Image: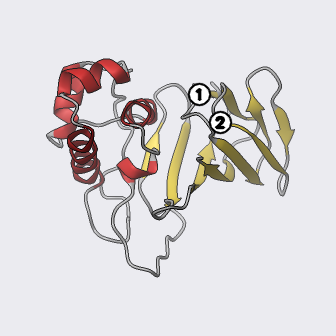
Amino acid sequence: MGSASAPIEPGTGTGTGADPIALIAASVRRERNRTGLSLTELAKRAGIAKSTLSQLEAGQGNPSVETLWALGVALGVPFSRLVDPPHSNVRVIRAGEGPVTHSEQADYSATLLAACPPHARRDVYRLVVQPGEPRTSAPHMPGTTEHVVLATGRALIGPVDAPIELTPGDYVTYPGDAPHIFKALEPDTTAVMVMEHI
């Protein structure tokens, strides 16, 4: 797992004016310090190069979705804890705004819309996916469940061995702690995904 050329879009609206790369760097440092892991140990657990992690923590990295998921799993925290900026009680994210991360394997981007507050266990994402290479996800933390409502386009979504074809308005839920897939069948396919953690 390395860094893609432009997985995070600096300057995207986050509602706070914060630089997404700096925010992620601070979040990774905070969570690594909380767990007491060294750079070497966290990099090993996440399956990434120590130099990649060092650059990321210094705010010089450009992490992909895959890298951030691997770090979240290694740290035992939801993906959202690494990318969600602090915010007030009222939060509006307009279309095209929010912290966006991109896959290095597919034309797939995920915008975090809402992270789970303390003692709640859900995150909400807006997905924009293009046809081509599917986004195949490795299992997330044990007990993770994903819920997807397709907004536009058409897609195959769900377990890798039995994805379901969805059209606008369709909903699917499936275990996020098993391999799963999102394959767009039409250009500019969009969806809302709610991820639950137990």
Q: Nearer the viewer, residue 42 or 156?
A: 42
Q: Are marks 1 and 2 in contact (CB under 8 Å)?
A: yes
**Residue located at (76% from left, 34% from top):** 158
**Residue located at (81% from left, 30% from top):** 163
**Left of 31 or right of it: where is 114?**
right
**Residue located at (52% from left, 43% from top):** 109
Residue 27 in the image: above or below residue 40: below
Q: Residues within 10 Å of mark 1 (few under 14, many from 20)?
A: some
Secondary structure category for the residue under label 2: loop
Q: Label 1 to label 2, Cα distance in Å?
A: 6 Å
Kind of residue indicated by mark 1: Pro
Residue 172 in percent (x, y) is at 81, 46
**Left of 59 or right of it: where is 28?**
right
Mark 1 lies on residue: 139
Q: Which quadrant holds residue 125?
A: bottom right
What label sits on residue 176 in the rendered view? Answer: 2
Position of the N terminus by quadrant: top left
Residue 131 in percent (x, y) is at 68, 33
Kind of residue indicated by mark 2: Gly
**Residue located at (82% from left, 54% from top):** 168
